[in-house]
Image (cartoon, rainbow, N blue to C red):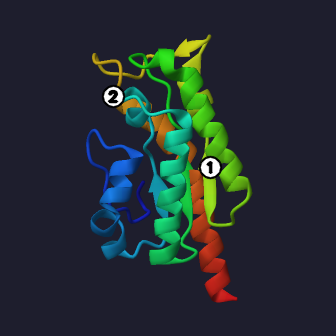
Amino acid sequence: MAPLPVINRGFGGSTVADVDYYFDRVVTPYRPRAIIFYAGENDLAFGKTPADVAADFARFMDLKTKALGATPVWFISVKPSKLRWAQLGEQARVNTVVRAQAAGRKDLHYIDVVPAMIAHGKPKEIFIADGLHMTPDGYVLWTTAVRPVLQAEAKRRTACKAA
């Protein structure tokens, strides 16, 4: 995400509930100016319902508000993958709920990566052999969706400080 300063606090196999559980270790000590959040896909694969995932994310937002106030959060939509293509409908339900949450909060923003990852009704060829994890080309798609949003926010914050 250069030139933006980023601290990667992601951990493999995590769920939204894991992020909630470890919040005081993986978020709070860093006092971030913004949070880019991606989780939810593993939750569904491990048997949680879309409502469970959305409730866990609402808890994350509560934890964030208590610890960090109005710090903005950008939720990257739960992504489609070859391995979990059968869960596309459940993923869409999670994404719909989070998008609705974002519409009602000034500190939550939604970034939809799903359209960029699908072509002709199936996942693009941007996954390694496991069908779940992305190739560098997949991360380029994400960067293309995420970086402009964050750069615009950084520019807005700079303008507010100068005013």
The tag earlier along the polypeptide, 1 or 2, is: 1
> Dot 2: what SS?
loop
Looking at the picture, tell me which residue is in the foreground, 68 or 145. 68
Q: Which mark is residue 38?
A: none
The residue lying furthest to the bottom in this view is 163
- Tell me which residue sits at (61%, 70%) in the image: 155
Residue 53, position as x, y percentages in the image: 49, 42
- Quadrant for the N terminus in the image: bottom left
Lateral position of residue 12 relative to residue 100, left or right:
left
- Tell me which residue sits at (40%, 36%) in the image: 43
Residue named by callout 2: 133
Looking at the picture, tell me which residue is in the foreground, 150 or 93. 93
Q: Amino acid at mark 1?
A: Tyr
Looking at the picture, tell me which residue is in the foreground, 155 or 87. 87
Lateral position of residue 17 relative to residue 144, left or right:
left
**Dots 1, 2 in contact, CB < 8 A:** no
Q: Residues within 10 Å of mark 2 (few under 14, many from 20)?
A: some
Residue 2, position as x, y percentages in the image: 41, 57
**Residue 21 higher or lower than 138, as above or below:** below
